[in-house]
Amino acid sequence: MSSGIKEQNEMNEEKIRRRKSERWQRGRRTPAPFNLSNDEMIFLKKNTRYDEEEIKDWYRGFRNDCPDGTLTKKKILEMYEVILPNANSSLFVDQIFRIFDKDGNGTIDFKEFMMATDMTASGTVEEKLRWAFKMYDEDSSGTIEMSEMTDIIGTLYEMEGISRECAVARAKKIFMELDVNGDGEISEEEFVKGCLKDQGLVRLLNAGGEEEVSLLDNGDEGGE
């Protein structure tokens, strides 16, 4: 397929994805009353890329589909399959609920949904990596261990249909390169710096899995 046709197909797919997302944001039925608290609005404007009107649009769709103000794992999976059609959404949704569903009742609220949506749909590669790091730094210590590193990169790769074996091999290589003092831990800055040197992972996060990547390159291509 020529590059021109490929680019046009990608543009068409993006337009379809955007229309589907916008239809859900605005709701399929009569708009529900807007009663998001002022504190929640301020928080979302400060911590996401959305402005007030966009947040209201998302909230109306959320309330129409989730009138009790909570979102189930099944419903959010349906949404991410529209927003991120090329990804293995079930893996990502599992991670969202592991972080946000603190009481284990199987639901998350609107604010938590918006935080996750903002990062996955519009974040830069570095922002996605920092967000992924925080997902696994459960005690907020600012460091992660080897097992947590493999979980992070394994999830990122598996979301795009890449084998777990390749992900684990890459994670171990990055970790060993960064853990220079051998204490078995690396910081957020070390994690981000190391992952950004992995061109396969960078291309994967940039392209949403549409590019064929080599996961077994030397990890230093294009690095400092």
Image: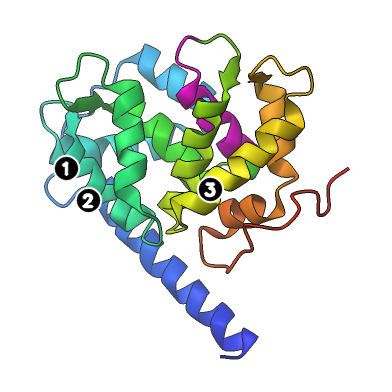
Numbered badge on residue 125:
none
**Disc 2 vs disc 1: Cβ atoms closer than 8 Å?**
yes
Q: Quadrant of the C terminus?
A: top right
- The crowding category of the residue bearing disc 3, from other C-alpha atoms within 10 Å (few below 14, some 14 to 19, many at least 20), is many
**Residue position for label 1:** 74
Crowd rating for badge 1 (residues with CA inside 10 Å; few <14, some 14–19, many 20+): few
Q: Residue furthest front?
A: 182
Seen as rendered, the residue at the extreme bottom is 1
- The image quadrant of residue 111 is top left
Question: Count the marks: how many?
Answer: 3
The answer to whether residue 190 is left or right of residue 164 is right
**Does the segment drawn in magenta span residue 70?**
no
Numbered disc 3: secondary structure: helix
For mark 2, give the secondary structure: helix
Vertical position of residue 191 compared to residue 13: above or below = above
> Quick one: quadrant of the N terminus?
bottom right
| Residue at point 57%, 21% (across, down) | 145
Q: Which residues are magenta?
A: 126-139
> Residue 167, which numbered label?
3
- Can see residue 49? no
Q: At which x and y percent is residue 197? A: 75, 45
Q: Amino acid at mark 1?
A: Lys
Residue 127: where, in percent of width, then height?
Answer: 61, 35
